[in-house]
Amino acid sequence: MQSRPPRPTRRGLLGAAGVLSSALLLAACGADTSGRYESGYVSGDGVTTEIAPAERDEPLEFSGETFDGEDFSSVDRQGELLVVNVWYASCPPCRKEAPDLQAVHEEYADQGVSFVGVNVRDSAGPAKAFEESYGITYPSLPDQDAEIMYELRGQVAPNAVPSTLVLDREGRVAARISGAIDPSTLRAMIDKVLTE
């Protein structure tokens, strides 16, 4: 008669979940000490994903305090589109796409489209210097402890830095760009969701 392996304990499962979430964060954000990512970040290749309205998951809900000390909640943005950009200041493709993100933000500001950044690495000093340097006027939330990234997991989660999600009026992920945005692609995604 074979003996059965011991049943996992709650503590063991929580520990495993913590290790897994740490590994996923490093995979998503890159790690300066990782030999796999010489540049210190994991860059996507610009692959896009779009999800038909009937196939979208539940709304995402995340909140926090912006680098400017303002409260932000994705729930407060339901009823409009929300573009979520995952970034950090020393990430080369994040610097490359920053002017384009700001331009698209300005273009759609009066059409019920909001933008928010999720900064996965920086303290307020480097983040605000980046925003000032690139003229970024939409808010960003610090997320060094990956709490927001955890809330963004699901059907189509950010899987690179940078990543950009387009949330529909219900707060559901409608589209993702993995890697630096192409502004015309982002505009097309926003336009499509605006017509729903």
Image (spheres, grey):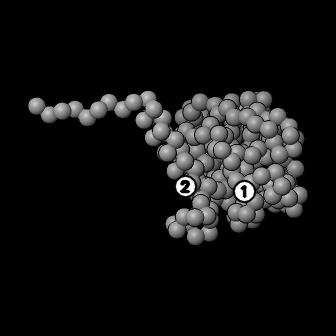
Amino acid type, label 1: Tyr
Q: Residue at x 65, y 39 (%)?
A: 147
Q: Residues within 10 Å of mark 1 (few under 14, many from 20)?
A: many
Q: Position of residue 141 (x, y in %)?
A: 76, 44
Circle 2: residue type: Ala
For this rendering, which residue is in front, 69 or 44? 69
Is label 2 in contact with label 1 (beta carbons under 8 Å)?
Answer: no
The residue tagged 1 is: 88
Q: Residue at x 62, y 37 (%)?
A: 151
Q: Is residue 80 left or right of residue 61?
A: right
Q: Please name the residue shown 54% across and 64% down the image.
A: 34
Q: Nearer the viewer, residue 120 or 113?
A: 120
The local secondary structure at tag 2 comes to helix
**Mark 2 vs mark 1: which is more N-terminal?**
2
Image mark for residue 169: none
Residue 174 x, y percent position in the rendering:
63, 40
